[in-house]
Amino acid sequence: MKRFLAGLLALPLSAFAQSQTAPEPPVEAHPIGMLVFVVLFVGFCAVFGWMVWRNKGQEGRRETRSPDSPGPDSAPRPHCRPNFHRRTAAMRARGWGVNGT
């Protein structure tokens, strides 16, 4: 398998080295490639502008916090309680429900 992959990699390189004349670079870019580039570029610019325009009025709403939310200096809350997964696995093994019923 290694010999096959090495030969497969060496095949295009050896074919390129055996060619007698160097191909001339194209004078002009292919029109389909240019069209695809222009469509993608204009599309991405339009979507970016639409996202900025859509979120323009949300600057004030981001700053407001509910009284229940922690402040910016508080430590992040853990995703789940410690030992929760171990505890639920043991409860399932005993035939109990997840909530201990």
Image (tube, rainbow, N blue to C red):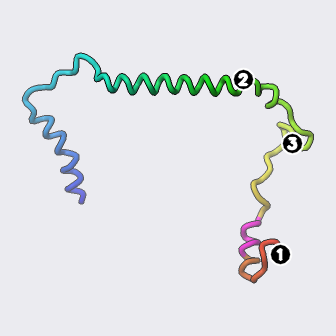
- Which quadrant does the N terminus fall into? bottom left
Residue at the image point whose x is 77% and y is 25% from the top: 59
Residue 87: quadrant of the picture: bottom right
Residue at the image point whose x is 71% and y is 81% from the top: 93
Label 1 sits on residue: 100
- Which quadrant does the C terminus fall into? bottom right
Q: Residue furthest right?
A: 67
Question: Where residue 98 appears, x then y in whole percent?
Answer: 78, 72
Q: Which secondary structure type mostly characterizes the magenta part of the structure?
A: helix
Give the alpha-carbon distance from disc 2 to disc 1, as whole Å. Answer: 49 Å
* Numbered label attached to residue 70: 3
Q: Secondary structure at mark 3?
A: loop
Q: Residue furthest bottom?
A: 94
Question: Where residue 67 appears, x then y in whole percent?
Answer: 92, 40
Depth order, front residue of 67/77: 67
Which callout, 2 or 1, points to the residue nearer the camera? 2
Residues tagged 1 and 3 counted as in contact (Cβ below 8 A): no
Residue 92: quadrant of the picture: bottom right
Depth order, front residue of 55/13: 55
* Numbered label attached to residue 56: 2
The span shown in magenta is 83-89
Q: Tell me if mark 1 has few (under 14), some (14-19) or many (20+) residues whose alpha carbon lies within 10 angstroms of its own.
A: few
At label 3, the amino acid type is Pro
